[in-house]
Amino acid sequence: MTRISTPALESMLPKPLSMPIAFPRTYHGSSPAREGWKQFLQWIKDEPPTLVLCEATGGYERHFVLALADAEVPFRVVNPARVRDFAKSCGILAKTDKLDAKVLATFAAERKLEPQKLQDETQRKLKELIGWRRQLVKAKTMHRNQLEHASYKTVVKGTKSLIEQIDKQIEKVEAELNQLIDDDPQLSNLNDILQSIPGFGPEVARTLIVELPDLGTGDPAKLCSLAGVVPFNCDSGLFRGKRRIYGGRGTLRTVLYMAALTAVKCVKADNLFKQLYLRITATKPHKVGIVAVMHKMLIIAHSLVKNNQKWKNKMIKNC
């Protein structure tokens, strides 16, 4: 294995967290947030890097990544779990910022990582709004559950008021989401294609647009793996374990699951998804059939987007 000796840039974030960035020269930044980023960008002007690699930190890396993109510096954000597993595979159990940077550099060299593209402004807005809507829906569900057990008048009245306010916020968010999509001809066409598929509503279509920007252009197998709908083997010698799905993007898998449930409830005889579900569940468990429908839905969505076609058999009224 090629060993890369790489010090770290410690870019201080708004909260007391540090984000190690692998770089083949010595730099230690201790300035808070944007000041540290400016110092780093100034420092690399004389000798531009081929790649700046950093770990995802729950969103705290976003402003730094935007600063790199604005400065036209090639970058890539990686899953910290994969980097930690890579470090363990190399026998590295200790964890410090400097050591993490060395591991990141070695990880990038071994994997031969390429720079990633930054999502455009509309995509970033959509992603943030969808995340906010999801939080609002969770908050509404929580307050509705609390309302079932509330007995004191003040608590009941206050909880109902909160639910009404959340409903208004959800309406505003959905209106802005629809406006953003309608204002972009490409996204509007993509949204129409996706919503023509049985079981796909506005939330499913918007989530696919944001979470799978390569839909219609990427490798279908990789897209399904990214969505977490690919059953993985668990075999050893003569042992044949159960195939299970895991990994991938949870939000994407959740909306596909709900779309599959909706589609298989359709009573139309020529509904492709229900036929698939009934054929599989004749001999296998319910969840296996649902996962198969989720997988089929994503493959069909990819094909329709790729060929710029809508679903031919529209959803029937009693679905």
Image (cartoon, rainbow, N blue to C red):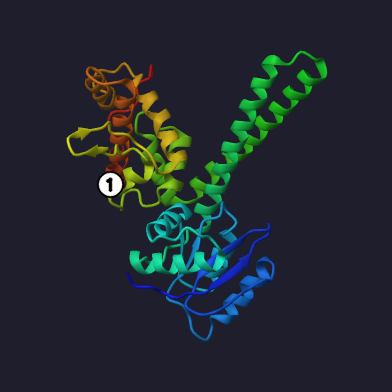
Residue 69: tell me if it is visible.
Answer: no
Q: Give the residue at the far left of this rendering.
A: 238
> Measuring 50% from the left and 52% from the top, which residue is drawn there?
123
149 to 295, vertically: above or below: above
> Measuring 57% from the left and 45% from the top, which residue is drawn there?
129
Residue 174: tell me if it is visible.
Answer: yes
Q: Position of residue 198 (x, y in %)?
A: 35, 29
In the image, 94 versus 120, the foreground residue is: 94
Q: Position of residue 210 (x, y in %)?
A: 46, 47
Q: Quadrant of residue 309?
A: top left
> Measuring 36% from the left and 34% from the top, which residue is drawn there?
196
- Picture mark count: 1
Q: Secondary structure at mark 1?
A: helix
Q: Left or right of 26: which side holds 252?
A: left
204 to 40, vertically: above or below: above
In the image, 93 versus 126, the foreground residue is: 93
Q: Quadrant of residue 190?
A: top left
Q: Give the residue at the far top of this rendering.
A: 151
Instruction: Give the position of the N terminus as an image quadrant.
Output: bottom left
Instruction: Give the position of the C terminus as an image quadrant.
Output: top left
Q: Give the residue at the far bottom of this rendering.
A: 46
315 to 130, vertically: above or below: above
What residue type is disc 1 on? Pro
Q: Position of residue 288 (x, y in %)?
A: 30, 26
Q: Position of residue 130 (x, y in %)?
A: 54, 42
In the image, 57 versus 313, the foreground residue is: 57
Check disc 1 and report the residue beneath it.
220
The crowd level at tag 1 (other Cα within 10 Å; few <14, some 14-19, many 20+) is some
> Measuring 57% from the left and 59% from the top, which residue is drawn there?
61
